[in-house]
Amino acid sequence: MGAVDVRFLNHPPRFLFFTGKGGAGKTSLSCATALELARQGGRVLLVSTDPASNVGQVFGVTIGNTVTPIPHVPGLSALEIDPEQAAEAYRERIIGPVRGLLPAKELASISEQLSGSCTTEIASFDEFTGLLADDDLRNAYDHVVFDTAPTGHTIRLLQLPGSWTDFLEAGKGDASCLGPLSGLEKHRTVYAQAVSALQDPSLTRLVLVARAQESSLAEVERTFRELSQIRIVGEYLVINGVLPATAGEEDLAQAVRGREARAIATMPSAIAGLTRDVIELKAANMVGVEALDTLFVTAEAADNLRQQPEAPIVTTTSLGALVDELEQDDHALIMCMGKGGVGKTTIAAAIAVALAHRGHEVHLTTTDPAAHLAGTLNGSVPGLRVSRIDPGESTRAYRDHVMATKGKALDDAGRANLAEDLLSPCTEEVAVFQQFSKVVGESRRQFVVIDTAPTGHTLLLLDAAGSYHRQVALQMGDSMPFTTPLMRLQDPKKTKVILVTLAEPTPVTEAEGLQGDLLRAGIHPWAWVINDSIAAAHPESPFLRRRAASEIGQFDRVRVLADRVAVVPLLATEPIGVDRLIALTESAPHSTP
């Protein structure tokens, strides 16, 4: 039937964890793995703690925080730990006892400190540690498949020396990551058992999932190194969604296959030697048992098993239409935001180049680690100035400052706690925002385009902790009008936030969560951009046209969420260089197949 030998499924242990960047296909792989193990006669429990997971939708059944048998698949059950519900219950355990004792503003501040990604992950980990340490569960199931794995940062937090609660009550640390730890209820020995299970290859297999893209493979390498430091070894790598030969030989297909081959050939050495599986992209979305049965076969065999309708006609708006609207004013702060791997750097650069090309003064500032855009654009376009903020350097300087000030009087255990807290993703956002805030004021006179902006949670965390906004408000009072950086970000006339995503379920779900963060901070996104759309590229091959059809549902989701939506097609030639970036904004609105 065209089945492929899937190496990570050979002699599987009790626990299988899938981890990787959003949109890499963790949910599809974990669901297909659980299905395959059940087909082999095993008793299998599929557990999801991924905020963007759609396990219930994949199987067409409502799954909640109770073990639910999957219809028509003997031996397979599923459990979804809703991260948001877990985090909300977690916050309530911390805030509930002091509600009515503290002022409303203080409660709001504590709540915001407990609203970040670290809280969500710690709360989720608190929920499923019992699954790893539960002897009854081991007897009930042959395999437990986890859709998403905890990060090394979360596990290191659980292993910190001393008492988390005492550390916080003594006022030695900020409640960014350490705060969430104060709500943990299980005894340390339970967490030690869970971590021990993760570290035992006879019990646990960690499967790293990536797309055949440089950014995705780089993210997997970071995860691999981070987990290896705490003796959790990932020996298996799955490169998912590789364009198959059945996609045809049109220019677009050949270009994508070439890019994927180069990414695989030049992947980081740390992961290049791992046991590797390559899974071909299928024309259909992985929804339903019938579709999942095709994931571990060749794309050609899958096409023979499941014929899909070809893409309908839809109307899209070009990126150029957004630029037309942006340039109605001669200045603005434009922030391009989105999860990694969706192309926000390219979109930010295209907007900046287009505005400069039309005669405006523009400052583009980016945190692109590769810095290739700065090299390509510097001095290329009259009126365009490009700067680069090094996130690593900014974060190191920020950590050093905090350790030298707050950490100065701490004992060894306290310094270890504080140092681990400063490894939080929030730390980088705070450090980078301090650099960004220096250029925000320039938008009063010109266009400032920011690639990779701080999330709403980071902005609220800064404000709650006594940020510049609060300090200025306190000092100025009612004596005279003033505008702080946060107020400028909240003003839709001064700031235009553009969310960048892909026409795939996980990136859209992640962008929706990001929009929710911003709305909590009083910042309303101005537009969304759907990048790298196959449908908008007018593909010719039946395979790509059927793949384009799978995007339509995501188009509909984004239109509900966004005031403005622009679509950028997947291109045969990567948009690097001024001419190609300008071309992204010069195409007119059109219909897609």
Image: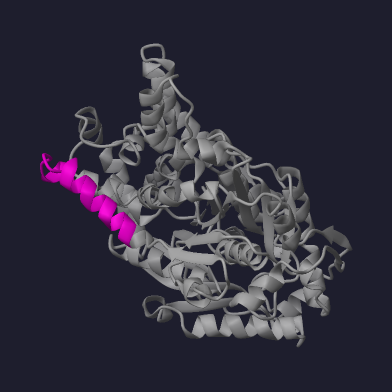
Q: Is residue 12 visible?
A: yes
Indicate the position of residue 469 as horizontal and vertical percent values. 42, 33
Q: In the rendered view, does 236 fall on the left or right side of 294?
A: left
* Quarter of image, res 560: top right
Q: Is residue 117 above or below residue 377?
A: above
Q: In the rendered view, does 128 fall on the left or right side of 466?
A: right
* Part of the protein shown in magenta: 393-415
Answer whether residue 403 is magenta in the image. Answer: yes
Answer whether residue 361 is magenta in the image. Answer: no
Q: 50 or 257: nearer the eye?
A: 257
Q: Can residue 192 be seen in this view?
A: no
Q: Residue furthest right?
A: 313
Indicate the position of residue 338 as horizontal and vertical percent values. 56, 55
Quarter of the image with the N terminus is: bottom right
Indicate the position of residue 370 as horizontal and vertical percent values. 45, 72
Point 56% across, 53% down: residue: 446
Q: In the rendered view, does 447 fall on the left or right side of 225?
A: right
Q: 369 or 249: nearer the eye?
A: 369
Q: Is residue 85 above or below residue 79?
A: above
Q: Residue furthest top?
A: 100
Q: How is the image coloured?
A: one colour
Indicate the position of residue 455 as horizontal and vertical percent values. 49, 46
Point 62% across, 86% down: residue: 258
Q: 58 or 21: nearer the eye?
A: 21
Point 36% across, 17% down: residue: 98
Q: In this view, does 481 lie above or below 558?
A: above
